[in-house]
Image (tube, rainbow, N blue to C red):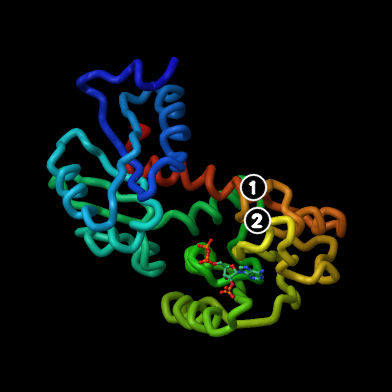
């Protein structure tokens, strides 16, 4: 039964806010979960062009039955600036991907990209606390994951990025926020690290180079992806061939959905 058939006057409304809007996936993910869990809620697409973002948010805020938003491109930064309160990861990353309207209709935002990655690893039996990690990439996703790995208490974090200056900036920011965690910039070589996580976009397309030389993929190393499609990136294929353990990209999204749903209180 489609979720829309069970909408009544008591249904709490949530949204996913974006521009463009047609590609968003949150309604297809959350509405079946609401059905499964028997939650009286619906997730709808909210199309907010950048120049009308504040007007749209003011309107949603004024609706007592509107619970909050999953936030996606291009609004993650702009909405953070409009929030009344932002959680630590959101502040560190400089972007929010979920916003809740509380009982006073204040906007509370946070970022669950990195926490989703860490929870996804744990769900697959891969603890990161106390482990040494080589992170490839220092883009948007890499930023969130680096802070979350430090927050989880990795024993060492080495960041490599094609553009070294971005790795240096990120390593300095993570180090300032988590001084107890040794963070450095390094080459694309595990150099004793137990986990390699690819946060670069290399792997999305067949023609992409491997983000790390396959000779460095040694048995026992855990190689984690955040790319979801293809599920088996060239990096993961090489890692399997070389006897490494692997972690698929989809676990990060699965766990983010749990975390965002919990934050929005929409699974209650
Ligand atoms: P996202 O929001 O998905 O993280 P992004 O912010 O554009 O996307 O970051 C993309 C990351 O992939 C960056 O770390 C980028 O490296 P640069 O900072 O040097 O651009 C990295 N990246 C993209 N293509 C790559 C490639 N072919 N080899 C290595 N790194 C690559």
| Whole-percent x, y for residue 78 in the image | 29, 62
Residue marked by disc 1: 229
Q: Residue at x 20, y 46 (%)?
A: 102
For marks 2 and 1, give the CA distance.
Answer: 7 Å
Q: Indicate left or right for 77 with 186 as reference.
A: left
Q: Is residue 122 above or below residue 185?
A: above
Q: Is residue 49 above or below residue 37?
A: below
| Whole-percent x, y for residue 268 in the image | 34, 31
Q: Is residue 207 above or below residue 42?
A: below
> Could you say whether the residue bearing mark 1 is in a helix, strand or loop?
loop
> Could you say whether the residue bearing mark 2 is in a helix, strand or loop?
loop
Q: Residue at x 82, y 58 (%)?
A: 238
Mark 2 and mark 1 lie on one chain; the one further toward the N terminus is: 2
Front residue of this view, candidates 90 and 77:
77
Question: Few, some or many C-alpha atoms within 10 Å of disc 1 (few <14, some 14-19, many ≥20)?
Answer: few
Q: Residue at x 75, y 78 (%)?
A: 191
Point out the image quarter for the N terminus.
top left
**Some atom of ligand 1 lies within 8 Å of the CB belonging to the residue at label 2:** no
Residue marked by disc 2: 204
**Some atom of ligand 1 lies within 8 Å of the CB belonging to the residue at label 1:** no
Q: Are marks 2 and 1 in contact (CB under 8 Å)?
A: yes
Front residue of this view, candidates 255 and 20:
20
* Quarter of the rendered image showing ligand 1: bottom right
| Whole-percent x, y for residue 248 in the image | 67, 49
Q: Which mark is residue 54?
A: none
Q: Residue at x 35, y 34 (%)?
A: 43
Front residue of this view, candidates 98 and 150:
98
């Amino acid at each position: 039964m489609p979720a829309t058939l069970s909408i009544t006057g008591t249904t709490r409304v949530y949204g996913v806010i974006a521009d463009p809007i047609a590609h968003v996936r949150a309604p297809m993910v959350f509405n079946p979960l609401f059905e499964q869990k028997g939650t009286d809620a619906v997730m709808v697409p909210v199309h907010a062009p950048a120049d009308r973002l504040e007007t749209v948010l003011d309107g949603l805020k004024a609706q007592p039955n509107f619970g909050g938003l999953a936030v996606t491109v291009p609004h993650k930064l702009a909405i953070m600036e409009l929030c009344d309160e932002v959680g630590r990861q959101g502040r560190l990353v400089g972007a929010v991907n979920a916003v809740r309207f509380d009982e006073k209709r204040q906007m509370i935002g946070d970022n669950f990209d990195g926490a989703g990655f860490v929870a996804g690893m744990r769900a697959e039996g891969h603890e990161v606390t106390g482990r040494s990690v080589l992170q490839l990439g220092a883009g948007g996703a890499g930023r969130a994951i680096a802070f979350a790995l430090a927050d989880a208490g990795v024993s060492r974090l080495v960041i490599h990025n094609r553009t070294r200056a971005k790795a240096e900036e990120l390593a300095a920011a993570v180090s300032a926020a988590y001084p107890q965690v040794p963070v450095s910039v390094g080459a694309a070589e595990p150099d004793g690290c137990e986990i390699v996580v690819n946060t670069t976009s290399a792997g999305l397309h067949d023609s992409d180079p491997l983000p790390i030389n396959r000779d460095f993929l040694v048995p026992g190393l855990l190689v984690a992806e955040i790319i979801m499609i293809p599920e088996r990136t060239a990096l993961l294929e090489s890692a399997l061939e070389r006897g490494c353990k692997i972690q698929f990209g989809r676990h990060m999204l699965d766990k983010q959905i749990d975390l965002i749903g919990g934050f929005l209180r929409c699974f209650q």
